[in-house]
Image (cartoon, grey):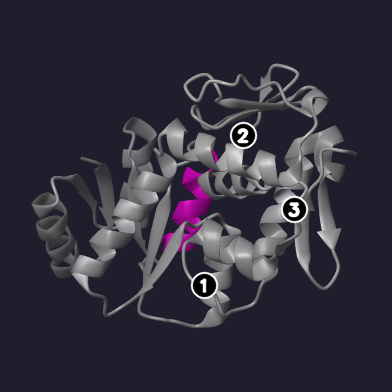
Amino acid sequence: MARLLVVDDEEKIRLIIRKYAEMEGHQVTEAKDGIEAVSICALEDFDVIILDVMMPGMDGFAVCKQVRRYKKIPVIMLSARGEEYDRIKGFELGVDDYVVKPFSPKELMCRVRVVVQRNSVSGTAYIKSALQSSAQAGQSEKSQDIEDSLTDRKVYRHGDLVVDFTGRSVMIKDHRLDLTPKEYDLLFYLVENRNIALSRDQLITNVWGYDYYGDDRTLDTHIKRLRSSLEEYRSCIVTLRGVGYRFDDHI
Protein backbone atom coordinates (compact mmCIF):
# COMPACT_ATOMS: atom_id res chain seq x y z
CA MET A 1 0.00 0.00 0.00
CA ALA A 2 1.18 3.49 -0.84
CA ARG A 3 0.04 6.89 0.38
CA LEU A 4 -1.00 9.04 -2.58
CA LEU A 5 -1.78 12.73 -2.80
CA VAL A 6 -4.02 13.45 -5.80
CA VAL A 7 -4.00 17.10 -6.85
CA ASP A 8 -6.45 18.21 -9.56
CA ASP A 9 -9.00 21.01 -9.80
CA GLU A 10 -11.46 18.63 -11.50
CA GLU A 11 -13.38 16.62 -8.91
CA LYS A 12 -14.29 13.99 -11.50
CA ILE A 13 -10.62 13.27 -12.19
CA ARG A 14 -9.83 13.04 -8.47
CA LEU A 15 -12.69 10.59 -7.90
CA ILE A 16 -11.66 8.36 -10.80
CA ILE A 17 -8.06 8.21 -9.57
CA ARG A 18 -9.25 7.56 -6.00
CA LYS A 19 -11.47 4.69 -7.15
CA TYR A 20 -8.70 2.88 -9.00
CA ALA A 21 -6.05 3.67 -6.37
CA GLU A 22 -8.19 2.27 -3.56
CA MET A 23 -8.85 -0.83 -5.66
CA GLU A 24 -5.05 -1.28 -5.63
CA GLY A 25 -5.03 -0.89 -1.85
CA HIS A 26 -3.57 2.62 -1.79
CA GLN A 27 -4.52 5.33 0.69
CA VAL A 28 -5.62 8.54 -1.05
CA THR A 29 -5.67 12.17 0.05
CA GLU A 30 -7.15 14.78 -2.29
CA ALA A 31 -6.31 18.43 -2.92
CA LYS A 32 -8.44 20.60 -5.19
CA ASP A 33 -5.73 23.15 -6.00
CA GLY A 34 -2.01 23.85 -5.71
CA ILE A 35 -2.19 25.95 -2.56
CA GLU A 36 -4.07 23.22 -0.69
CA ALA A 37 -1.57 20.63 -1.95
CA VAL A 38 1.41 22.59 -0.62
CA SER A 39 -0.30 22.99 2.77
CA ILE A 40 -1.08 19.28 3.00
CA CYS A 41 2.47 18.29 2.02
CA ALA A 42 3.86 20.49 4.78
CA LEU A 43 1.96 18.43 7.35
CA GLU A 44 1.89 14.92 5.88
CA ASP A 45 4.19 12.49 4.08
CA PHE A 46 3.31 10.69 0.85
CA ASP A 47 4.85 8.01 -1.33
CA VAL A 48 3.70 9.62 -4.58
CA ILE A 49 2.03 12.86 -5.64
CA ILE A 50 -0.22 12.70 -8.71
CA LEU A 51 -0.20 16.32 -9.79
CA ASP A 52 -2.19 18.14 -12.47
CA VAL A 53 -0.27 20.81 -14.37
CA MET A 54 -3.05 23.22 -15.35
CA MET A 55 -4.69 24.55 -12.18
CA PRO A 56 -5.89 28.04 -11.22
CA GLY A 57 -3.76 30.07 -8.84
CA MET A 58 -0.72 27.82 -8.45
CA ASP A 59 -0.03 25.42 -11.31
CA GLY A 60 1.57 21.99 -11.00
CA PHE A 61 5.05 23.21 -11.86
CA ALA A 62 4.92 25.78 -9.04
CA VAL A 63 3.61 23.15 -6.61
CA CYS A 64 6.39 20.74 -7.53
CA LYS A 65 9.04 23.42 -7.10
CA GLN A 66 7.62 24.51 -3.74
CA VAL A 67 7.27 20.99 -2.31
CA ARG A 68 10.73 19.95 -3.49
CA ARG A 69 12.24 22.69 -1.33
CA TYR A 70 11.57 20.64 1.79
CA LYS A 71 10.53 17.14 0.70
CA LYS A 72 11.73 14.68 -1.94
CA ILE A 73 8.43 13.04 -2.83
CA PRO A 74 8.13 11.29 -6.21
CA VAL A 75 5.79 13.16 -8.57
CA ILE A 76 3.68 11.97 -11.52
CA MET A 77 2.46 14.92 -13.59
CA LEU A 78 -0.92 14.96 -15.35
CA SER A 79 -1.55 17.34 -18.22
CA ALA A 80 -4.04 17.90 -21.02
CA ARG A 81 -1.12 19.29 -22.98
CA GLY A 82 1.46 16.91 -24.41
CA GLU A 83 3.91 19.51 -25.65
CA GLU A 84 7.55 18.55 -25.43
CA TYR A 85 8.35 21.83 -23.65
CA ASP A 86 5.99 20.96 -20.78
CA ARG A 87 7.48 17.48 -20.40
CA ILE A 88 11.00 18.86 -20.37
CA LYS A 89 10.08 21.52 -17.83
CA GLY A 90 8.57 18.87 -15.58
CA PHE A 91 11.55 16.55 -15.82
CA GLU A 92 13.93 19.42 -15.13
CA LEU A 93 12.04 19.99 -11.88
CA GLY A 94 12.68 16.35 -10.99
CA VAL A 95 9.29 14.91 -11.98
CA ASP A 96 9.36 11.10 -12.09
CA ASP A 97 6.75 10.54 -14.79
CA TYR A 98 4.45 12.50 -17.08
CA VAL A 99 0.99 11.35 -18.18
CA VAL A 100 -1.07 13.12 -20.85
CA LYS A 101 -4.86 13.43 -20.46
CA PRO A 102 -7.05 11.65 -21.32
CA PHE A 103 -5.34 8.70 -19.66
CA SER A 104 -6.12 5.13 -18.73
CA PRO A 105 -6.63 4.85 -14.94
CA LYS A 106 -5.22 1.32 -15.06
CA GLU A 107 -2.09 2.53 -16.83
CA LEU A 108 -1.74 5.34 -14.31
CA MET A 109 -1.86 2.79 -11.48
CA CYS A 110 0.86 0.80 -13.24
CA ARG A 111 3.00 3.91 -13.37
CA VAL A 112 2.34 4.56 -9.68
CA ARG A 113 3.42 1.00 -8.91
CA VAL A 114 6.65 1.44 -10.90
CA VAL A 115 7.49 4.73 -9.16
CA VAL A 116 6.79 3.28 -5.71
CA GLN A 117 8.85 0.17 -6.40
CA ARG A 118 11.68 2.25 -7.81
CA ASN A 119 11.84 4.36 -4.68
CA SER A 120 11.46 1.52 -2.19
CA VAL A 121 13.39 -1.16 -4.05
CA SER A 122 14.98 -3.80 -1.86
CA GLY A 123 18.71 -3.93 -1.54
CA THR A 124 18.91 -7.36 -3.17
CA ALA A 125 18.10 -6.11 -6.67
CA TYR A 126 20.68 -3.36 -6.41
CA ILE A 127 23.19 -5.73 -4.87
CA LYS A 128 22.93 -8.31 -7.66
CA SER A 129 23.26 -5.60 -10.26
CA ALA A 130 26.26 -4.16 -8.44
CA LEU A 131 27.89 -7.60 -8.36
CA GLN A 132 27.39 -8.04 -12.10
CA SER A 133 28.67 -4.55 -12.86
CA SER A 134 31.68 -5.09 -10.64
CA ALA A 135 32.56 -8.31 -12.44
CA GLN A 136 32.17 -6.66 -15.85
CA ALA A 137 34.23 -3.65 -14.91
CA GLY A 138 36.99 -5.55 -13.09
CA GLN A 139 36.62 -3.15 -10.19
CA SER A 140 39.68 -2.55 -8.01
CA GLU A 141 39.41 -3.24 -4.28
CA LYS A 142 40.71 0.16 -3.23
CA SER A 143 37.73 2.02 -4.72
CA GLN A 144 35.04 0.00 -2.97
CA ASP A 145 34.43 -1.43 0.46
CA ILE A 146 31.87 -4.18 -0.07
CA GLU A 147 31.63 -7.50 1.75
CA ASP A 148 31.45 -10.80 -0.14
CA SER A 149 28.12 -11.76 1.39
CA LEU A 150 25.02 -10.61 -0.53
CA THR A 151 23.30 -9.62 2.69
CA ASP A 152 26.24 -7.44 3.69
CA ARG A 153 27.08 -6.10 0.26
CA LYS A 154 24.96 -2.98 0.42
CA VAL A 155 27.39 -0.10 0.29
CA TYR A 156 29.73 1.22 -2.39
CA ARG A 157 32.64 3.39 -1.27
CA HIS A 158 35.04 5.54 -3.21
CA GLY A 159 37.20 7.61 -0.91
CA ASP A 160 34.83 9.70 1.21
CA LEU A 161 31.91 9.03 -1.13
CA VAL A 162 29.49 6.44 0.25
CA VAL A 163 26.54 5.18 -1.80
CA ASP A 164 24.07 3.13 0.24
CA PHE A 165 21.91 1.22 -2.25
CA THR A 166 19.62 -0.33 0.35
CA GLY A 167 19.09 2.82 2.38
CA ARG A 168 18.91 5.01 -0.75
CA SER A 169 21.37 7.54 0.61
CA VAL A 170 24.56 9.16 -0.60
CA MET A 171 27.11 10.69 1.76
CA ILE A 172 30.38 12.58 1.47
CA LYS A 173 32.44 12.88 4.66
CA ASP A 174 29.41 12.00 6.82
CA HIS A 175 27.31 14.69 5.07
CA ARG A 176 24.17 13.31 3.45
CA LEU A 177 23.47 14.70 -0.01
CA ASP A 178 20.03 16.17 -0.64
CA LEU A 179 19.02 14.52 -3.92
CA THR A 180 15.67 14.12 -5.65
CA PRO A 181 14.39 10.55 -6.21
CA LYS A 182 15.31 10.78 -9.88
CA GLU A 183 18.82 12.02 -9.04
CA TYR A 184 19.24 9.02 -6.71
CA ASP A 185 18.11 6.69 -9.48
CA LEU A 186 20.49 8.24 -11.99
CA LEU A 187 23.49 8.11 -9.65
CA PHE A 188 22.70 4.55 -8.57
CA TYR A 189 22.52 3.40 -12.18
CA LEU A 190 25.79 5.14 -13.03
CA VAL A 191 27.53 3.63 -10.00
CA GLU A 192 26.09 0.16 -10.63
CA ASN A 193 27.57 0.34 -14.12
CA ARG A 194 30.73 2.19 -13.12
CA ASN A 195 33.59 2.41 -15.61
CA ILE A 196 31.21 1.40 -18.40
CA ALA A 197 30.25 3.81 -21.19
CA LEU A 198 26.48 4.39 -21.05
CA SER A 199 24.61 5.93 -23.95
CA ARG A 200 21.97 8.60 -23.47
CA ASP A 201 19.31 6.11 -24.59
CA GLN A 202 20.46 3.57 -21.99
CA LEU A 203 20.32 6.13 -19.20
CA ILE A 204 16.92 7.53 -20.16
CA THR A 205 15.37 4.09 -20.66
CA ASN A 206 16.74 2.54 -17.46
CA VAL A 207 16.38 5.54 -15.16
CA TRP A 208 13.14 7.04 -16.45
CA GLY A 209 11.67 3.63 -17.19
CA TYR A 210 10.53 4.06 -20.77
CA ASP A 211 11.74 4.98 -24.25
CA TYR A 212 12.15 8.73 -24.51
CA TYR A 213 12.10 10.51 -27.84
CA GLY A 214 12.18 14.13 -26.73
CA ASP A 215 14.96 16.59 -26.04
CA ASP A 216 17.75 14.98 -23.98
CA ARG A 217 18.39 18.20 -22.08
CA THR A 218 16.47 16.55 -19.25
CA LEU A 219 19.33 14.08 -18.78
CA ASP A 220 21.94 16.82 -19.05
CA THR A 221 20.13 18.89 -16.41
CA HIS A 222 20.10 15.99 -13.94
CA ILE A 223 23.77 15.25 -14.63
CA LYS A 224 24.60 18.90 -13.98
CA ARG A 225 22.77 18.82 -10.64
CA LEU A 226 24.44 15.55 -9.65
CA ARG A 227 27.88 16.95 -10.38
CA SER A 228 27.12 20.01 -8.29
CA SER A 229 25.99 17.82 -5.37
CA LEU A 230 29.00 15.50 -5.63
CA GLU A 231 31.40 18.43 -5.09
CA GLU A 232 34.99 17.12 -5.25
CA TYR A 233 33.71 13.87 -6.81
CA ARG A 234 31.96 15.66 -9.68
CA SER A 235 34.75 14.64 -12.05
CA CYS A 236 33.77 10.97 -11.56
CA ILE A 237 30.85 11.59 -13.92
CA VAL A 238 32.62 11.78 -17.26
CA THR A 239 31.01 13.15 -20.42
CA LEU A 240 31.59 10.93 -23.44
CA ARG A 241 31.06 13.21 -26.39
CA GLY A 242 28.69 11.72 -28.92
CA VAL A 243 27.96 8.77 -26.64
CA GLY A 244 26.71 9.63 -23.16
CA TYR A 245 28.25 9.40 -19.70
CA ARG A 246 30.37 7.13 -17.50
CA PHE A 247 30.96 6.98 -13.75
CA ASP A 248 34.73 6.62 -13.47
CA ASP A 249 36.15 5.87 -10.01
CA HIS A 250 39.71 5.60 -11.30
CA ILE A 251 39.88 9.38 -11.25
Q: Residue at x 46, y 32 (%)?
A: 123
Left or right of residue 78: residue 205: right
Residue at screen point 75% across, 18% down: 173
Q: Is residue 174 in view?
A: yes
Quadrant for the N terminus in the image: top left
The residue tagged with tag 1: helix, strand or loop? Answer: helix
Is residue 191 at all visible to an observer of this figure? Answer: no
* Circle nearer the N terminus (2, 1): 1
Q: Position of residue 126 (x, y in %)?
A: 51, 38
Q: What type is the residue that disc 2 sits on?
A: Asp
Q: Residue furthest right?
A: 251
Q: Quadrant of the C terminus?
A: top right
Residue 191 colored in magenta in the image: no
Query: Is 166 or 86 nearer to us in this picture?
Result: 166
Q: Position of residue 224 (x, y in %)?
A: 75, 53
Question: What whole-number distance in Å separates the C-alpha atoms at marks 3 and 1?
Answer: 29 Å
- Can you identify the residue that label 3 sits on? 196
> In the rendered structure, does residue 68 fall within the stretch colored magenta?
yes
Q: Which residue is mark 1?
A: 87
Q: Which residue is mark 2?
A: 178
- Say left or right for 25 vs 248: left
Q: Are marks 3 and 2 in contact (CB under 8 Å)?
A: no
Separation of residues labelled 3 and 2 (CA atoms): 26 Å
Q: Is residue 9 above or below residue 70?
A: below
Residue that appears at 59% across and 79% down: 214
Q: Earlier in the sequence, mark 3 or mark 1?
A: 1
| Amino acid residing under circle 1 | Arg
Q: Is residue 71 left or right of residue 231?
A: left
The residue mark sitting in front, 3 or 1, is 3
Which image quadrant for residue 135? top right
The region drawn magenta spans 57-69
